[in-house]
Amino acid sequence: MADIVAVAGTSHSPVLAMEPQKMWSLRAEHDKSNPELYDTDGVVRSYGELAERAGDRYLAELKPEVWDRKFQQAQDDIGRLAADLIALDLDAVLVVGDDQDELFSHQNLPSIAVYHGAEMTTHHAIEMGLGPEIVEVQRLLGMDGESYPCDAELGRHLIESLVEQGFDISSSDSTAPDTGFGHAFAWVAGRLLKGHAIPTVPILLNTYFKPNQPTPARCYDLGVALRKAVEAAPGDARVGVVASGGLSHFVVDAELDRTLLDAMSDHDAATLRGLPARRLDSGTSEIRNWVTAAGAGAHLATKWVDYQPAYRTPAGTGIGLAFGLWA
């Protein structure tokens, strides 16, 4: 019997790709004009409103030595997580991530999609409107335009099993020319597992874009169904699940992030299924990927979790950097 033997979660932010004095400062400037600054109640606020409400609450978090310490800790976590996953001798990895106009468009935007092609090609680095330096950052995040192996047979089996379990699944076995999988998937194949040809199965959730974002309850139940599907697969494959993205951004919601991580470690399905959807928009929406992974790993023990609220402006903008392993 195939089995899910590990679940991992990893942030994949651009702030992980370059020393803070450059990238964190650049992102801080971008925050000041970002129209997607949702506060911790899920309400869109201007940067000025957030800064006024925050006062001097976050000033101590903006010191160069604090940024440097958090950046280095995140690099250590990335290395640790990569080493742990490789040591598990996995036969396949289910990557749960979101697509942000890299493969899908609003002309056709599935809520849940499973890829069952033989390989995936990552998206080439893009400028993102933040200056040419961001192109190199994107390469460091894994967006190298290279092709990586996928487990097409397992992907097709998952689709068939999920449909039997009552999920309406979109499927794809190839991508259009001049497109590629985005940073959620590139991060895992092109950075975290770079140099180790572990076949993946990309599972794409529409976390970002209304009106068909899956609810937290649906995401958790999807994870439970994925575990059942894997266990029904032929053979005795050792399968891992990696949630890629998050946690809260572009406004840090440390309370929400810690609620998620505590619930994952406690196997608290009620809390995970009941996370408030109104607080899961913009970048924070990627918490849905972690909820899905939690459902798939409810039988696994917490090995380690590290969380750092990485603030970069007085307004409290930034990202909740999180990494963890359950096995």
Image (cartoon, rainbow, N blue to C red):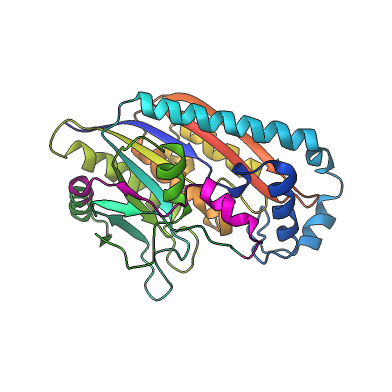
Q: Image point 27% across, 39% down: which residue?
A: 227
Q: Is residue 154 left or right of residue 78?
A: left
Q: Is residue 153 above or below residue 304?
A: below
Quarter of image, res 254: top right
Where is residue 247? Give x, y as percent: 56, 45
Quadrant showing the C terminus: top left
Q: Could you say which is closer to the camera, residue 199 or residue 48?
A: 199
In this picture, residue 98 sits left or right of residue 158 = right
Residue nearest the observer in this picture, 137 or 286: 137
Residue 124, x across and y down, in percent: 46, 58
Residue 136 sits inside the magenta stretch? yes
Q: Up-down: is 43 above or below 200?
A: below
Residue displayed at 50% across by 51% down: 286
> Left or right: 116 with respect to 67?
left
Q: Does the magenta run of residues contain 214? A: no
Number of on-image labels: 0
In the image, farthest residue toward the bottom = 107
What residue is drawn where x is 56% and y is 37%? 322
Residue at image location 83% in from the left, 38% down from the top: 60
Q: Which residues are magenta?
A: 129-155
Residue 256 seen anywhere in this rendered image of the structure: yes
Quarter of the figure that contains the N terminus: top left
Tell me where residue 171 appears, x and y as whole percent. Answer: 26, 61
Q: Is residue 252 visible?
A: no
